[in-house]
Amino acid sequence: MSISRRVFVKSGGLALFSFGLDPLFLARAAFASYRPLPPVTARCRPVLVCLFQRGAVDGLNMIVPHGDPLYYRERPRIAVPERDVVDLDGHFGLHPRLAALQPLWHNKSLAAIPAIGSPDSTRSHFDAQDYMESGTPGAKATPDGWLNRYCQHDREHQNTPFRAVAFGPQLPRILAGSAPSLAIDDLQAFGLRAPQPAARDRLTRAFEALYAGSATGLLSTSSQEAFQAVQMLQQVNPGQYQPANGADYPRGRFGKAMLQIAQLIKADVGLQLAFADVTGWDTHVNQGSSEGQLAARLAEFGQALAAFAQDLGEKLRDVVVLTMSEFGRTVRENGNSGTDHGHATAMLVLGGPVNGGKVLGKWPGLDPANRFEGRDVAVTTDFRDLFTEILARHLGATDLAAIFPGFTPDQARFPGAIRA
């Protein structure tokens, strides 16, 4: 007997994804003896961390064009005052609540890319998120995500169940596909500090429940990989982790996710791709300027990124962090002191391999004549040009056209985010 659909099994915080599974295999695996797994050999494995600012972050108040008077004219209530902006290059600056990232700018490990986004004109959150995660703007039928397709076409790092991990309760669209991926909501939630026999009993009951057809929680097609992941996490012992170098992560879901990503990177379990969602960016009402709703979200965001970089220390040399959002927001504030759905947004790239200390891409300006449909920041950098550059120059991907079907990658369009 086989199961041809995805199987969802809840098992306290760990989820593994793939397709087609034999429940008899799961039942046998449940009784397999735990034996120590050899650690993944540390080989300066490059790591990409993707962070999705879900809800459409206001790129103009995140990377502020304070040198453009039109910015202040169009936003009399929500523009960040020039005195508060953390200046970057005389024209652009960081929102003051991102001040924790300024040292990364000065040491050339942080770059900003304004006017970046999708060539598709949709202002639908659902469609735009789907296009950005599938990597195929305008095409709704794409079955898998672009990070998963990278894993499908690059098989060099398949010796670990921790190659691609999403930190959250479910697998995101960007990691959906035939290549195995994990979704981990909480490294400590799988009973990892329990004695080994008790942990084994817990797993046995979970797999027996799956075999009996009841829902438990592990999203899986390979119980072998599930067992390997649990065994490796037991050896890592996440409950004992202490951030290094005085790093202080903000309390909250996102800070916790970044701490756990840092932990897995330093544990050398083979993590290559990590993903985390950061929600709360849909600011139609009372957005605020230096203070307020958006400022509070940016404060947590900036503090978590700064803590992550501080915690990793020298290991940041092999890590690139990419922030993304489905689209930006209108240039002009609305009548509710907020902003509506727009077009281009801004993204950040940080890490050791980053060509930092620069604002990259072509800035179209805020002149109404240059705006998209007369109201939004125009897209001058297709998000796929940035994503393909990171895959090629940081992860060493070669078959970029297969990862982004229907798109012709061209190094001449790379924004220059990664040092060649």
Image (cartoon, grey):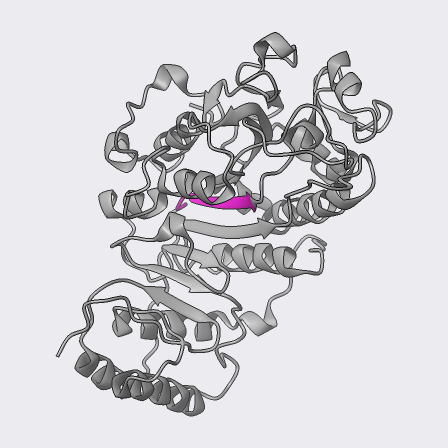
| Position above or below: 183 against 302 | below
The image shows residue 142 at horizontal and vertical percentages of: 28, 43
What is the quadrant of the C terminus in the image? Answer: top left
The answer to which image quadrant residue 16 occupies is bottom left
Using the rendered image of the protein, determine whether residue 398 is visible from the camera's viewpoint.
no
The image shows residue 265 at horizontal and vertical percentages of: 48, 54
Looking at the image, which residue sits at the far top?
369
| Position above or below: 102 against 36 | above
What is the quadrant of the N terminus in the image? Answer: bottom left
The segment highlighted magenta reads 44-53
| Position above or below: 270 against 144 | below
Callout count: 0
Looking at the image, which residue sits at the far front?
335
Looking at the image, which residue sits at the far right?
83
Q: Is 321 inside the magenta-drawn segment?
A: no
User: Which residue is at a point 42% across and 25% down the rendered structure image?
Assistant: 119
The answer to which image quadrant residue 395 occupies is top left
Using the rendered image of the protein, determine whether residue 367 is visible from the camera's viewpoint.
yes
Query: Mainly helix, strand or loop, the magenta region?
Result: strand
- Viewer-side residue, 358 vs 176: 176
User: Which residue is at a point 64% across and 64% down the rendered structure image?
Assistant: 242
The image shows residue 10 at horizontal and vertical percentages of: 41, 76
User: Which residue is at a point 29% across and 50% down the rendered structure image?
Assistant: 157
The image shows residue 237 at horizontal and vertical percentages of: 52, 73
- Viewer-side residue, 83 vs 267: 83
